[in-house]
Image (tube, rainbow, N blue to C red):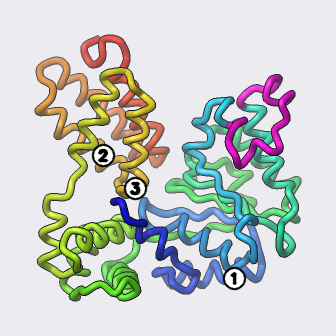
Amino acid sequence: MDAPLWTDVHAPSLDDLPQEEVRDRLHDAVDEPVNLVIHGPVGAGKTAAVRALADAAHEDESDLVELNVADFFDMTKKEVANDPRFEHFISPKRRRNSSKADLINHVLKESASYPPVSGSYNTILLDNAEAIREDFQQALRRVMERHHEATQFVITTRQPTKLIPPIRSRCFPVSVRAPTTEETVSVLEDIVEAEDVDYDDDGLRYVAGYAGGNLRKAILAAQAAYEEADEVTMDAAHGALQDVGADDQIKEMLDDAEAGEFTDARKTLDDLLVDEGMDGEEILRDVLRIGRSRYGGDELAELHRFAGEIDLDLNEGTSDRVHLSHLLAELGREGGLTQ
């Protein structure tokens, strides 16, 4: 989509969150800030909820520091040092003499120790925290202990059991369930009315059913229907979404992976996960479907074997990006699937 994404344009406030119990709990956290572990399935609105919390709690947006764990801990040492969010407190000497682990620990400490621009505390969001290695979790625990008076830590994850007990014990758990069809329809209705888009109830319900509890996917699907038919009615939604797929992008991603162009392949993967709102299981399913017309014999058998391992990892709740990147790397290694 070339137009601004509705997921960004219509980011919810606390009062707009569809799950009543989440609204109530986060309103309490504005009045009495505590560390939080916010957990729930893909697309339930965990990150949007944290941003809404920070917007209600802070007058200045810079008092929210966002670290997507899957990206942050996957960075190279050079990428961490040159990231515009962090480079101002990483000295040239530290860049030369520190390991990647030291730089990441330094970034955590510095982010937590910076005084807030407004109010009495800042908020650090650690998104997709199931990807944090245990040694970094131990470092995070020490940072949380040292800076608890001036920094609120909010951790989002699909699998809170991946967090070490000392971190879980320092955070209040908030469960974010997948929104119901009625809640999803209500969110979509607010958005299409704000966009002055023609719609009907059947169209919104079709989109909500198509998304299956993934709110981000529902919003992007409604936008896709509007961009194709200039409305979100039943006919428009059905026509736009029945053929919606990412086949061209996935084929391009596989081409790049096989050619050893891993950076390009992973960029396409990020587009699918973030811009298109797909989850890892959807992408893996499409890779296998396309793979059946692309490979044969031993290659196809090897793809299915390796995909089974990735599927198990995805179901354990760890980072979709990390595990699917592993699959792309496997396709690009010398000999590929035949080795």
What is the quadrant of the N terminus in the image? bottom left
Q: Residues within 10 Å of mark 2 (few under 14, many from 20)?
A: some
In percent of the image, x 88 and y 53: which residue is there? Answer: 146
Viewer-proximal residue among 233 and 164: 233
Q: Residues within 10 Å of mark 3 (few under 14, many from 20)?
A: some
Q: Compare marks 3 and 2 and give the one earlier in the sequence.
A: 3
Checking the image for residue 28, the label placed there is 1
What is the secondary structure assignment of the residue under circle 2? Answer: helix
Type of amino acid at the residue the image marks with label 1: Asp
Which residue is rendered at x = 76% and y = 35% of the image?
A: 103
Estimate how packed mark 1 is, as few (under 14), some (14 to 19) or many (20 or more) residues with alpha carbons within 10 Å. few
Q: CA distance from mark 2 to mark 1?
A: 37 Å
Q: Closer to the camera, 188 or 133?
A: 188
Name the amino acid type tagged 2: Ile
Callout 3 amino acid:
Asp
Residue, disc 2:
283
